[in-house]
Image (spheres, rainbow, N blue to C red):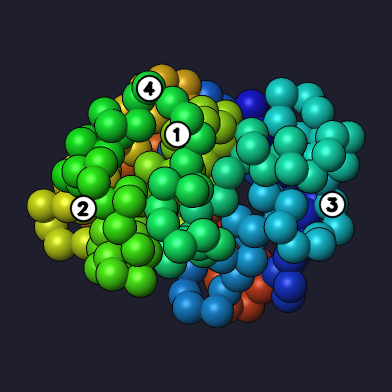
Amino acid sequence: MLRVDYLSVGGLAPLSFEAAAHECLAIEGPSGSGKTRLLRAIADLDAAAGYVYLEGVERREMPGPEWRRRVRYASAEPAWWGAKAREHFPATAKLDRLLSAVGLESVLLDRPISELSTGERQRLGLVRAIADDPRVLLLDEPTSALDAQAAALAEELIKFQILLGRIVILVSHDSQQLTRLANARLQLTDAGTARSRESAAA
């Protein structure tokens, strides 16, 4: 269980909500309403007042790197600090399988990141987020640069993570994608308030 209590992000009213294993919570709202800031605050990447608990442990009760290993934020355009993608991935036997799941070949790991397309980098970023089995995935526009076929593959991988018991919190401009993946929604407004509503994933 991920529990957020009175988390204060930017101009938003303090937010409180929960998301459980096997669930996908969609964060909706107009541009500038604070969706990305909320995900980054949950991941403890940006300072924010309030509390975030994972399985009863508050984020400040463990070292930041350990929290972010369990509660993983993945942006639409992932950051890379090495010249090649392989430098950013843990050594795991399932890596080739994860790459194949999103339509990528392992040879891409050894090409310069500067030579990869935006869509290839985005899919690599999704795989990187998943590869070391975080408990929570905070996905910020995970398919925004993908064509329909690649987006469908990415969605199937996200669905599988939900089936495995991960908690997924999803920001997406694609309302149909939210309908397919999310079973609950949190609506942010440009007035700095939020409301929640249930929805059934297809």
Which of discs 2 and 1 lies nearer the camera? The answer is: 1
Q: In percent of the image, x 30 and y 58: which residue is there?
A: 111
* Relative height, residue 199 to residue 159 (above, below): below
Q: Which mark is residue 151?
A: 2
Find disc 1 in the rendering and name its residue: 131
Q: Earlier in the sequence, mark 3 or mark 4?
A: 3
- Categorize mark 3 by other alpha carbons within 10 Å: few (<14), some (14-19), many (20+): some
Report the Cα–Cα distance between label 4 and label 2.
Answer: 24 Å
Query: Looking at the picture, which amino acid does disc 1 mark?
Result: Ala
Report the front residue among 113 and 48. 113
Query: Looking at the picture, which amino acid does disc 3 mark?
Result: Gly
Q: Earlier in the sequence, mark 2 or mark 1?
A: 1
Report the front residue among 97 and 83. 83
At which x and y percent is residue 161?
39, 29
Q: Earlier in the sequence, mark 4 or mark 2?
A: 4
Q: In percent of the image, x 64 and y 66: which residue is there?
A: 37
Q: Which mark is residue 50?
A: 3
Q: Earlier in the sequence, mark 1 or mark 4?
A: 4
Which of discs 4 and 2 lies nearer the camera? The answer is: 4
Find disc 4 in the rendering and name its residue: 93
Report which quarter residue 144 is drawn in: bottom left
* Relative height, residue 48 to residue 98 (above, below): below
